[in-house]
Image (cartoon, rainbow, N blue to C red):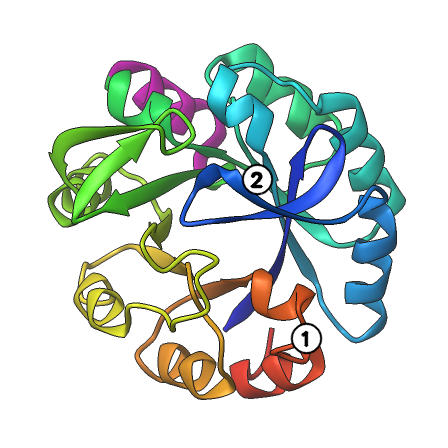
């Protein structure tokens, strides 16, 4: 199972939010490349980057910083936050991104999503962020009336291959991840699921790997020392 250490950027700083709340911010530093180098040094091959300002404002607010981060590391970087146009997709892919993540645009503009899938294939991933089982958008500031599991089925039907599913209530809360929802998602044919939100033990990593989850994102537990990336990688198995 792939492991994506998470680097969330707000105002140029590396931060973690608690349950997606922009007012509950932990700041860990102002040098994302240093964190990426530390992850790579212990064997990571992937990196999950979110432009939190972009997610909220719908623009590429931290593009220059993220582009420098991509070129400063050999990690395969997936990028999310504010990617709502083909120009934004092309900018990040040209900068060397492994893949880009649609969130708001996937729900609000399905025809646009389909066109991006047709043009870029598996370099497009979709972030499905769930609050109380419903899809949240615009940096998690709005909750739609779309059931999140149902949305995943719909995405699979139109050709989406990679979904990053986050249970917002677990994200950054250090209370454990929602294993039950990932058991359900693992049964959707044709989807590669990335688990995100609340992962705080190696036991959870092993459980996700055993149920066939493709990848997991680990954030706050790494930054506060609750998890060792070396042990996480070992529990996940081959990358």
Residue at the spot of label 2: 99
As helix, strand or loop, the secondary structure at mark 1 comes to loop
As helix, strand or loop, the secondary structure at mark 2 comes to strand
Q: Using the image as rendered, state which of residue 114 and residue 219 is in the foreground.
A: 219
Above-or-below relation of 172 to 98: below
Q: Using the image as rendered, state which of residue 162 and residue 143 is in the foreground.
A: 143
Chain-order first, disc 1 or disc 2? 2
Q: Using the image as rendered, state which of residue 69 and residue 222 is in the foreground.
A: 222
Q: Residue 104 location, x and y as percent?
A: 35, 25
Which span of residues is magenta-colored? 111-121
Left or right placement of residue 43 versus residue 213 in this view = right
Above-or-below relation of 156 to 142: below
The chief SS type of the magenta part is helix
Residue drawn at the location 71% of the way across and 23% of the way down:
63
Residues tagged 1 and 2 counted as in contact (Cβ below 8 A): no
Residue drawn at the location 35% of the way across and 47% of the way down:
161
Which dot marks residue 126?
none
As for residue 115 lying within the magenta part, the answer is: yes
Left or right placement of residue 50 versus residue 37 in this view = left
Which dot marks residue 225?
1
Within 10 Å of disc 1 (Cα), the crowding (few <14, some 14-19, many 20+) is: few
Quadrant in the rendering for residue 190 = bottom left
Q: Residue furthest front?
A: 23
Residue drawn at the location 11% of the way across and 44% of the way down:
150
Disc 1 and disc 2: Cα gap in Å?
Answer: 28 Å
Above-or-below relation of 28 to 117: below
Q: Using the image as rendered, state which of residue 106 and residue 114 is in the foreground.
A: 106
């Amino acid at each position: 199972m792939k492991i994506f250490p998470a680097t969330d950027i707000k105002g140029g700083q590396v931060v973690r939010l608690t349950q997606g709340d922009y007012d509950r911010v932990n700041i860990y530093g102002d040098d994302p490349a240093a964190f990426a180098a530390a992850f790579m040094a212990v064997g990571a091959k992937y990196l999950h980057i979110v432009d939190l300002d972009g997610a909220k404002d719908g623009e590429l607010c931290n593009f220059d910083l993220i582009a420098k981060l991509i070129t400063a590391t050999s990690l395969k970087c997936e990028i999310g936050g504010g990617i709502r146009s083909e120009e934004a997709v092309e900018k990040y892919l040209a900068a060397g991104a492994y893949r880009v993540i649609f969130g708001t645009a996937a729900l609000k503009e399905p025809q646009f999503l389909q066109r991006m899938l047709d043009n870029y294939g598996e370099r497009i991933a979709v972030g499905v962020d769930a609050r109380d089982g419903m899809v949240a958008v615009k940096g998690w500031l709005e909750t739609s009336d779309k059931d999140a599991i149902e949305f995943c089925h719909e995405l699979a039907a139109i050709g989406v291959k990679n979904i990053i599913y986050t249970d917002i209530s677990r994200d950054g809360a250090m209370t454990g991840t929602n294993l039950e929802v990932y058991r359900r998602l693992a049964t959707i044919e044709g989807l590669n699921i990335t688990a995100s939100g609340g992962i705080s033990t190696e036991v959870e990593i092993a459980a996700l790997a055993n149920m066939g989850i493709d990848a997991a994102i680990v954030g706050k537990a790494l930054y506060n020392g609750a998890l060792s990336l070396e042990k996480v990688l070992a529990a996940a198995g081959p990358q």
